[in-house]
């Protein structure tokens, strides 16, 4: 089993792999052409920068989701997790203003707490899934509800807002550019590269793929399945924490409506990118393209009034299904031969 | 004639109230207040105002007992209303229904038990159930916003609109706005749904800014959207060329900025979460006032400007 699913990775069938690898890229290219035809301002520098920066949230979270899904799991709690981490970060930073002031120290404290919270939340998901022997879908459905209601509770139903002076200090993390690219895009690039190396060039990445293909076989092959699976959820939590760190300075607030449906967007990005939902095969590069495709669809819909506003969801749904269907056309044939 | 009629019905209501109060163990006037669990800022503001009104009214009238219950969905709200009727034996029910259809029957049952019914904001699907109706005015919100736009803009000026979640409320506001703006020569470049959400407001406005080089004003319809819009304007450095944003609802942060004379957000149009308090006041008056109170109370969509901003500023409210 492991060998079979690993076979396409060894690049034995060029034409098939080419189509699979290039599929999402072609889709993105077509979308960009459509966007440009609808309105040349689509390719303006400002819009491209907006697009990339916006993709960063979902993209970073989706890199984490790629590991979870490759290892045969699923994490539905990421959107709520982002909201609760954002809320707690704001509370912590606001209360630290008295002692640490409104300088960089407070922001670093907030970011540090965010990372710890993300790792902690990911560990809880992983622990309950592996040691608690509860299906990941159920565990993360549960934590999704818990995290969501916690942020509503912390905000007293309203909105948590970051101290105004602190916002000034923290603001550049979202709005400033380094070498022509906004900071969130750099974080996105860094996370993508780290994720790619981890998945494709380390034993950990191979273990994830093996577990996703067949947990039983992985276990007999002396892979510490529970530990590896827990690590995937911790990576997911860490990615959510990083996304939150760049999200909070954007509007300086968090509420019960922060990050709603991010989990579905992240999962959609992963699947559009060519990762298999039931595990065993993951592609970080595809995930990045998937996240870009999703953001581009929303952006294009805002650039035209040809399509009724009420049909935005329909367009998004159609494009997602078509994008995946195009890939699976060849994937299906390939699978039939090998199995 | 009408007053006597209403007085008579009031008297009847009073007798009913007394009758059910007699069957209840305590001798208090019990008023149940049922509304959705606050999961977003506006509802949290409503919850806060309901609690404030409870404190104030119970202090004012020691024989009035207000019972506040919030429910996370329609089904549970129906149960909560049943409990208020059967367990508490309420004399009056103030209800902001989650949805109209599923809650019509439970409220009708409460009415059959003899309770006075006050419906807030969202009507029921059958007429004549409620004795008192208190609501904000959605078309008026759109109209007042458009009227303000007309005072500030000239023929040929361009605006963009960020709408809420596609619902009847959003349509009422939007249609009334468009009707009022028609014929003024102001161009509505485009309108997109920003779902009464800050993040969506930010992203939709970013795209509007990339798409349209010349925008003179933004109708954000809602204060959460307005906050996202202002962040996008700031990011694009287009917040200081005379452009202005009109929000709606009456969020405290926005009211504060208006009171300080902010040019980017000079006005706000009221759609007050405090309407629940109005409803509670009117309902208590049904038992306490010598004047008639049954009827429909449609609150004005007041234009909040720098002059009157402090009247609508509640710094302790979460909204």
Image (cartoon, coloured by chain):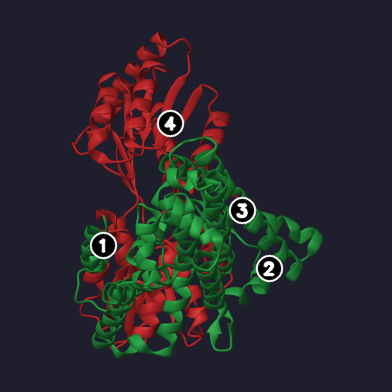
Chain colours: A green, B red
Q: Which image quadrant is residue B252 in?
A: bottom right
Q: CA distance from mark 3 to mark 2?
A: 25 Å
Classify residue A20 as left or right of residue A178: left
Q: Chain of mark 2?
A: A
Question: Of marks 2 and 1, which one's residue comes earlier in the chain?
Answer: 2
Judge if badges 1 and 4 mark residues of a common chain.
no
Give percent across and percent down for residue A37. 24, 87
The secondary structure type at the circle numbered 2 is helix
Mark yes or no: residue B139 visible.
yes
- Is residue A160 depicted above or below B162 in this figure? above
Judge if badges 3 and 1 mark residues of a common chain.
yes
Q: CA distance from mark 2 to mark 1?
A: 37 Å
- Is residue A180 depicted above or below A214 in this figure? below
Judge if badges 2 and 1 mark residues of a common chain.
yes
Q: Which mark is residue A313?
A: 1
Q: CA distance from mark 3 to mark 4?
A: 52 Å
Q: Nearer the viewer, mark 2 or mark 1?
A: 1
- Residue at the spot of label 4: B284
Q: Which image quadrant is residue A89 in?
A: bottom right
The secondary structure type at the circle numbered 1 is helix
Seen at 59% across and 65% down, the residue is A245
């Amino acid at each position: 089993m492991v060998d079979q699913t690993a076979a396409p990775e060894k690049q034995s069938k060029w034409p098939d792999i080419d189509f699979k690898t290039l599929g999402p890229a072609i889709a993105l290219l077509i979308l960009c052409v459509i966007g440009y035809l609808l309105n040349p301002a689509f390719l303006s520098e400002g819009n491209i920068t907006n697009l990339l920066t916006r993709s960063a949230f979902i993209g970073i979270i989706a890199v984490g989701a790629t590991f979870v899904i490759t290892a045969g799991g699923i994490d539905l709690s990421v959107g709520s997790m982002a909201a609760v981490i954002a809320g707690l970060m704001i509370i912590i930073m606001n209360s630290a203003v008295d002692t640490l002031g409104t300088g960089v120290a407070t922001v670093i404290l907030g970011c540090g707490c965010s990372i710890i919270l993300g790792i902690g939340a990911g560990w809880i998901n992983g622990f309950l899934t592996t040691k608690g022997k509860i299906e990941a879908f159920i565990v993360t459905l549960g934590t999704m509800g818990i995290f969501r209601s916690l942020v509503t509770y912390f905000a007293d139903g309203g909105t948590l807002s970051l101290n105004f002076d602190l916002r000034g200090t923290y603001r550049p993390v979202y709005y400033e550019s380094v070498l022509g690219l906004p900071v969130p895009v750099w974080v996105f690039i860094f996370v993508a590269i780290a994720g790619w190396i981890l998945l494709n060039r380390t034993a950990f990445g191979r273990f994830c793929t093996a577990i996703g293909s067949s947990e039983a076989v992985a276990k007999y092959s002396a892979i510490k399945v529970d530990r590896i699976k827990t690590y995937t959820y911790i990576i997911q939590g860490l990615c959510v924490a990083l996304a939150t760190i760049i999200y909070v300075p954007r509007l300086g607030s968090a509420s019960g409506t922060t990050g709603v449906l991010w989990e579905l967007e992240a999962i959609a990005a992963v699947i559009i990118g060519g990762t298999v939902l039931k595990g065993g095969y993951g592609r970080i590069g595809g995930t990045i393209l998937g996240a870009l495709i999703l953001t581009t669809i929303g952006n294009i819909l805002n650039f035209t009034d040809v399509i009724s506003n009420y049909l935005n969801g329909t367009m998004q749904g159609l494009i997602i299904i078509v994008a995946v269907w195009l890939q699976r056309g060849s994937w299906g044939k390939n699978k039939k031969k090998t199995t | 004639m009408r007053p006597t009629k209403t007085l008579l019905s009031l008297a009847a209501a009073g007798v009913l109230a007394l009758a059910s109060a007699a069957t209840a163990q305590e001798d208090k006037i019990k008023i149940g207040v049922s509304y959705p669990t606050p999961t977003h800022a506006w509802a949290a503001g409503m919850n806060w105002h309901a609690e404030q009104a409870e404190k104030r009214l119970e202090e004012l009238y020691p024989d009035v007992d207000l019972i506040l219950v919030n429910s996370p969905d329609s089904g549970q709200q129906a149960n909560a209303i049943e409990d208020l009727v059967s367990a508490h034996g309420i004399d009056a029910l103030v209800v902001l229904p989650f949805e109209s259809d599923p809650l019509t029957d439970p409220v009708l049952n409460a009415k059959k038990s003899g309770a006075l019914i006050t419906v807030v904001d969202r009507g029921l699907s059958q007429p004549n159930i409620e004795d008192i109706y208190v609501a904000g005015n959605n078309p008026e919100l759109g109209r007042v916003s458009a009227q303000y736009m007309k005072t500030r803009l000239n023929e040929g000026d361009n605006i963009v609109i960020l709408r809420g979640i596609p619902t009847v409320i959003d349509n009422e506001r939007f249609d009334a706005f468009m009707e009022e703006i028609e014929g003024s020569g102001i161009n509505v470049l485009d309108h997109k749904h920003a779902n009464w959400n800050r993040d969506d407001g930010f992203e939709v406005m970013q795209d509007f800014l990339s798409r349209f080089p010349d925008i003179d004003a933004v109708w954000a319809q809602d204060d959460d959207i307005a906050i996202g819009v202002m962040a996008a304007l700031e990011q694009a450095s287009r917040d200081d060329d005379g452009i202005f944003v009109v929000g709606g609802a009456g969020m405290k942060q926005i009211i504060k900025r208006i009171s300080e004379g902010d040019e980017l957000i000079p006005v706000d149009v009221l759609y007050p979460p405090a309407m629940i308090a109005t409803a509670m006041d009117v309902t208590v008056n049904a038992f306490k006032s010598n004047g008639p109170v049954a009827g429909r109370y449609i609150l004005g969509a007041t234009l909040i400007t720098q002059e009157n901003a402090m009247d609508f500023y509640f710094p302790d409210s979460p909204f």
